[in-house]
Image (tube, coloured by chain):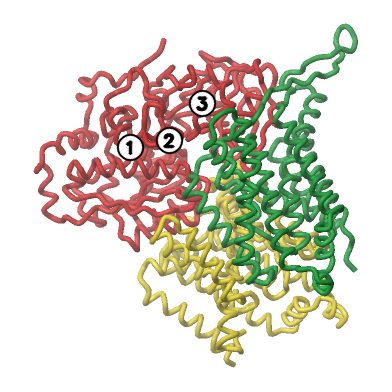
Amino acid sequence: MKQHNLHGSVLAVLFLAFFVMPEYHDGVFARIMVLAVYAVGYNLLFGYTGLLSLGHALFFATGMYGLALPMQHLDMGPVPAFLTGLAAAAMMSLAVGFLALRTTGVAFMIVTLMFAQAGFLTILYFGEYTRGDEGFVIQQADRMIAGLDFSDPTTRYFAAFCIFAAAFLFIAWLMRTSFGKCLVAIRENEDRARMLGYDVQLHKLLSITLSGVISGASGAAYAFLFGYAGATFASVQYSILPLLWVLLGGAGTTIGPLIGTAFAFYLVDFSSEITDAHLLVVGAAIVLLTLFAPQGLAGELRRRLFAWLP
Amino acid sequence: MRRQDSSANPVTRRRLLKTLGAGTGAIVAGSTIPGLFRYAQAQSSEPIKIGFQVHRTGIGAAYGRWYDRTTQAAVKRINDAGGINGRPVEIIAEDDGTDPKRGAEVVEKFATQSNCDVAFGTLFSHVVIGSAPRAGELKIPYFVVSEGHHVASGMLNRYTLQPGITDVKSQVEAMGPFVAANLGKKVAMIFPDFAFGHDHRDYFTAAFEKSGGQVNAHIAIPPTETSFTKYFPKIPQDTEVLYHVMVGPAVLTFVKELGEFFGSSRPELFGFIDSLEAVDISSPGLEFLEGTYFWEGNPRYAQDNQTSHDMNYRQAVGVDANGASVSDAKDVSTYAHMFGCWETLNIIKAGMEAAGYQGPQDRAKLIEAVEAMTELPLSDDHPQGAKIFNGKTHQVFGHQYITRVTEGKLVLAHTTSIEDTFYPDEADYTSQPF
Amino acid sequence: MDFGPHLFLACLEGAITAAVISLTAVGLSLVFGIMRVVNVAHGEFFMLGAIVAWWTATSLAGHPAFGFSAALVTAPLVVGLIAIIINRLILVRLNYDPERTIVATIGLLYVIQQTALMTFGPDARPVEPPFNTRIAIPWIGFGDSGFELIWPWGLATTTYKLAVIAAAILIVATVWLVISRTRFGLIMRATQQDGEMATSFGIPVRRVYAIVFAFGAALAALGAVLIVPVQQAHYLMGGDPLLLSFIVVIIGGLGSLPGTIIAAVIIGMSDGIISVFFSPTLAKILATLLVALVLVFRPQGLLGRRRA
């Protein structure tokens, strides 16, 4: 019950925040919610299933280009393009999962990293269509669904809110199903889960596919709501970011991804206002946090105050 | 044979000054007559805030540092001469990490948090393209200094302008005739395998073939690469000219390995200075560049025919005659690009004064004022040379310089006319609503 | 260029890449193999080594060989010392927990990069090699008068690049000797196989970790000193060596030094050879996929043993 209340209140706060926050933070939170979806997807695989991927930028970028390329070159409408992005991310993560899940631990990290790197280079290789690193703009005129202009701050905010709420509630629900409990069992002790008769490989494959689709949804939403697709989002850096967000926020918690994404953003934003050496501040903050809040922010809340936190 | 800067004749220039282009010249005069723009000053003495998106960290940091120095110098000069409409200019600088996501966030911050009047200064194309949609949506004029073709191609929007630096398409096309006439007819091209490199490939190849030459190889290097020798055998042996352009921290390795590959039997080399921007030409291993040619947006070494404008500009920014910092001879500037910040700020000033700019409500008027500009004469405001602004495509056109490495210095060999850099319009931003 | 000389040149370049990778990877192999922590900042130790080398070389006048030799001593020492401090201040407190180490070293990466940016600056700065002569390489071709020695266009390397290969072999051999023949090597191996067991035999595991961490960082710095005359010092140069050495260590098989070397050679050579047959970016894509597929079909690495 407390969990329902928590999830309800988080969403209520996000919904109401739009009407209270200054304009700048409305824009910021629209982006944070879209990127938090990416972190939610990453958290499913890393936080709940215990698989550390270093290649999630591939799924994010697949969703992004899955939406952006058909819109740019085939004049596809946003809704079918968004579905194309999800389908592309599903196929990509299924294929990567099929191969990469033959490995575990650090080898899994490397394999996913290499696939993502190959994906990044492929985007550059087909520069004729993707415009490579430079990327391309999705024109404001194309970012309309049923007369609603998604470049408008209000529409964008609530679009971001909807997609975040969907991903957030989906994971909260999934983790209460037997499927979700099995993922956690795999994380805790893979051999025992296998002995209990679970098909561990199948569960892992489904987990990586779902994780890939959610990450892809985030990429597609980013391209659509912020009007840009570029190869930077497929680079190694964007594979490390969700890991960082999830670990900062609290791996294996439902609200951790949102907290981590927001925290990381404001850390950069505030420190770069104060000093040119903002990376120094960010780096030091990350180090201190790992020293003094080892479970991430949400994990720390759970440990110290609210043991029931999901 | 050599065509020198045609803008040396001030009489014809002045006759051509039209409408708001005159604003630029008038400001120079006006700033020496205090009180001319007092009417505007009376309204507000709040500073004009210019949001400066700067590459302090990330791959663009070497450029960002010089863009910063140039911007500070230009703003000091503007403020010393009375500011804009009598109001002082304040720069709100923020790092974009040379990243398109952070770039967009920084533009949002300028528009909605720090209440900047305009945003300015971006160099790397992916940051421009990632940020420009946000600038358009937030309706904040966004003056980029990127040399990308993204503005003139029509991909961006009415709020994004590039009035201070020419674009890669015009630069590259103007090189075709020179290379064909002076260096050779068979060219192999080496370029980075991303959009900037592809622009070089497409536009140079077309221009060169029009001049009767032939490009016999395109070698696209993946941008993550740090060693290059293994790709050089793909250069056909009968190549007469090797056209090279590279960017990023590995540029010096690239040029050195080129020298080691060819030894004493190199073809003619024609490079974009991007391959060696912020790198000392006298670095060990670069001796073989002697006698090769470079495109430069603005000659790094002070030339024999140096104008007083270049002299003043160099002094204001703190650059010596060799293009290095006056305080550290090893700290080489990004001289071929950074003048764009200086000139863009002067355009912003001229535009704001022509539009009678008071505050954010006048942003559309500012854009219209800049769109109305045409001729920008060689002056202290435009020390790189005279330029022509195309209001429809939001892109400026200007002279390009070709220099030759002579005794370890880059010596001017050819200056193109502005007309050499023209190509048909690909966009008309003035038809877009505000 | 003809196919034969082209392939040979590509192999030679591949060998140089392999030498460079093995130098950076040996240090990581020790840290990763023995301490089981992923040090994301390992590449930054490499970068710091290059920067210290630049400082040493430019602050000493005289023949370039003098400054370079001095850098061979100063860079590993300085970077090793920094590593000891980081180990004491951070890693010990994290109890070498794998996940927390990853996050903490990401933080460290930012701190070190920003510090380098503020002190060293954003430019790529070259160090002059102690010697560097271009050597044209002869080739046996079939001419009008039968087989003859020819000097193909562009087939060349430099003395310094060859010296890097030699130095890599020397350093790797030394490390191998230390591990296999000395008492300290024995202790390291014991710690690697079973930390708890080693503790109960009275081995000061924590001190071994500190020394291994410093030693690994010093090796990365040494690799950087050797490479910086070919590739300049730059504050972002740490990313590539980190990824490559990470890959090499896994492909080789965790904690297997011979495996690390074999993997470095395979990756370096395949990078060179594949570039002969495909356009550069396509070659990179294929080389990257090759690495992934090797691991997919041999997850324990080439010389690693499959865990029961």
* Mark 3 neighbour density, 10 Å: few (under 14) some (14–19) many (20 or more): few
Q: Are marks 1 and 2 in contact (CB under 8 Å)?
A: yes
The residue indicated by pointer 3 is B282
Q: Residue at position x 61%, y 27% from top?
A: B189
For mark 3, give the secondary structure.
Answer: loop
* Mark 1 neighbour density, 10 Å: few (under 14) some (14–19) many (20 or more): many
Q: Is residue A166 visible?
A: no
Q: Give the Cα separation between the discs numbered 1 and 3.
A: 22 Å
The residue indicated by pointer 1 is B317
Q: Earlier in the sequence, mark 1 or mark 2?
A: 1
For mark 2, give the secondary structure.
Answer: loop
The residue indicated by pointer 2 is B333
For the residue pair B249 and C206, the one nearer the viewer reads as C206
> Quick one: which chain is yellow?
A
> Quick one: which chain is green?
C
Which amino acid, mark 2? Ser
**Disc 2 vs disc 3: which is toward the camera?**
3
> Quick one: which chain is red?
B
Query: The N terminus of chain A lies in which quarter of the figure?
Result: bottom right
